Structure formats: structure tokens, C-alpha cells
Image: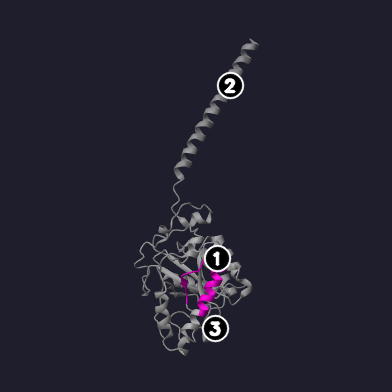
Amino acid sequence: MKNKILLNRIIAAAAVFILLFALSFTISYFSEKKNLQSAKPETDPQSADIDGNRKGGQDAQSLVPADPKDPSGTNTGEVVPVNQNPVANKVFDQPQKPAPQNKIIYLTFDDGPGAYTEQLLDILKENNAKATFFVTAIHDDYLDLITREAEEGHSVAVHSLTHEYATIYSSVEAFWKDFDAMNAIIREKTGSETLLMRFPGGSSNTVSKITPGIMTTLTKQMKEKGYYYFDWNVDSNDAGGANTPEEVFENCKRGVEDMRVSMILCHDIKEFTVKGMEKFVPWAIENGYTFLPLTTDDTSFNAHHTVNN
Ligand SMILES: [Zn+2]
């Protein structure tokens, strides 16, 4: 009798155990199925970038803006196709795709590298945002940062060796001497020269009037020699009225909100500009903008200004 009661208890315990096992198996099966269904393909490149989940094998073609023939609703600058950029190709690691609404930002920094460039590169890296650096050799202690700029997928472009208007624009020969010397430094730091450039003062500058007509000659020669020059359609105003991170942020934010494709002028030699980027870059990503570096294998947006000399 005692044995029978014990046997019954063992059978009952075993039954409960089997029931629990079956129940937990059923629960885990359905929760796994649910997980599989919610794991949709990553459609937002920006969020993928933030998570560090880079998608391999993305080719250069996917970087072409969705509507390259009319990249900006407000800028009237002509758009020229550009060829291979050895610097950009060398380090091609660009996981970002253009945003569907063409909310594209070409973030550009002139006059560096300098004391705050490293900090800026860290901000860009954290946000996986790419930019273009129009470099000089003014701050020669920082020239090695040109290598890091290229290695991290940014475009390196010529601005000027000296940035001294009176020398650069004193003659066509003087201009090319300064330009070629800067490109030689870029070759030394990155392994190849660049075809991208921005004129000191922009193509519409009037500081060059010491030599009448020189900008007309130089913009023409630039194209003939196979180079591509870029101006801007958004000004952070960090060389003008802005001198706080908040002002730089507001100017950039207001500027890009008016554009489908923006080329923002900034200077990485200014601490407040770099601090402004700490806020602007994440803001832009959160609001659906895509940061792209200027390249020559893209149908590039050049934001050309009107030549005034
Ligand atoms: Zn400059």
C-alpha cells in the first residue's frame, strides 16, 4: 500500500515535470519565431552606422545622389561629372547611402589641419560621418593629420600651401606654384595627389583683383587640367559673425533645412566650430541627413559661385 502511494507520487511528479518541459519548449519556440519576424532587413543606413554594423560590399555607385542632375532645389551652380579621385578611392570605406529625400550634406573644412582637427576627426568617427578637408600647410605641426583624414574615409583636397592672398593671386604662375606644392604634400601624406580643390576666398573672391581677370583664367584652367573646384551653398559663418558653437550649429541647421543637397563651409582651425559639430553632426543624422565626402567618381555637386574677377 505504502509502495503504491509512493509510485503514484513519482508518476504524478514525472507528469508535472514533462508538462513543464513541454510548456517551456512551446514558449521558446514561439518567442524565437517572433524574433525572426521582427528582424527585418536594415533599411536605415544611419542607424546601422551608429550601431557599428557596417554592411560590406557597398559599391561607389550607391553613393550617387538619387537625382544627381538636380541635386539642389535652390542652388543654381552647374553640376559637372567628376572622374576618379585617387585619395578617396585609396581609403574607400563609405557605408552610408544617400537619404531617400536627397537630404545630402557635403561637410567641408578649410584652412586646416590645425589644433582642433584631431578632435573633429573623433567626432566624425563616432558618428560615422564623412567630410572633405581643403587643406593648407599653415600649421605644419599638424600636417600628419592629413594621413588620418584620408585613412578614415574623408576626402583630402587642395586649398593652398600658404593661403596668402597677395602671393597666390599675384599671378597665374604664382597660383599654380602654391597649388602644386600643396598637392605634393598631399601626395606625401596620402600616397596620391588629389583632383579636388577650393580656391582661397572661393571662386567669387574679389581679393584677387590685384591681378584683374585672374579668377576667370584660373577657373578655366582648373577645368582644362582635369581638376574640380568647389564653393559652398551653406555658410557656418565661422569666418564671419559666428563665434560660438551654438551659432555654428544654428547656421548649419538653418542652412541645410533649406537645401536638398548642402555644401557647408566650415574651418577646422576654430575650436568653436569643432564644438558646434559635436551637436550638428548627430542632429543631422537623427533628422535623416546623410554626410558624404566629395569624390571624383560621383556626379558631384560643386555649388559654384559666380566668378567676379
Ligand atoms: Zn581658406
Indicate the quadrant containing the C terminus: top left, top right, bottom left or bottom right.
bottom left
> Quick one: 230 or 75, which is closer to the camera?
230
- The label nearer to you, 1 versus 2, is 1
Tell me which colouring the rendered structure shows: one colour
Q: Is residue 164 left or right of residue 43?
A: right
Quarter-wise, where is residue 184 in the image?
A: bottom right
Mark sitting earlier along the chain (2/3): 2
Q: Residue at x 54, y 70 (%)?
A: 186
Residue 147 in view here: yes
Q: In the rendered structure, which segment of residues is drawn in magenta? A: 177-198
Mark sitting earlier along the chain (1/3): 3
Label 3 crowd bin: few (<14), some (14–19), many (20+), radius 10 Å: few
Mark 3 residue CB less than 8 A from any atom of ligand 1:
no
Kindly give the residue lying farthest to the right in the view shown.
Answer: 2
Name the residue carrying label 3: 164
Q: Is residue 22 above or below residue 276?
A: above
The Cα–Cα distance between marks 1 and 2, rounded to whole angstroms, is 72 Å
Name the residue carrying label 1: 190
Disc 1, SS: helix
> Quick one: 231 or 260, which is closer to the camera?
231
Q: Amino acid at mark 1?
A: Thr
Magenta highlight on residue 195: yes
Percent x, y of residue 139:
61, 76
Name the residue carrying label 2: 14
Percent x, y of residue 32:
49, 38
Indicate the quadrant containing the N terminus: top left, top right, bottom left or bottom right.
top right
Q: Is residue 107 above or below residue 99?
A: below
Percent x, y of residue 72:
38, 70
Q: Residue at x 43, y 89 (%)?
A: 212
Magenta highlight on residue 281: no
Q: Amino acid at mark 3?
A: Glu
The Cα–Cα distance between marks 1 and 3, rounded to whole angstroms, is 24 Å
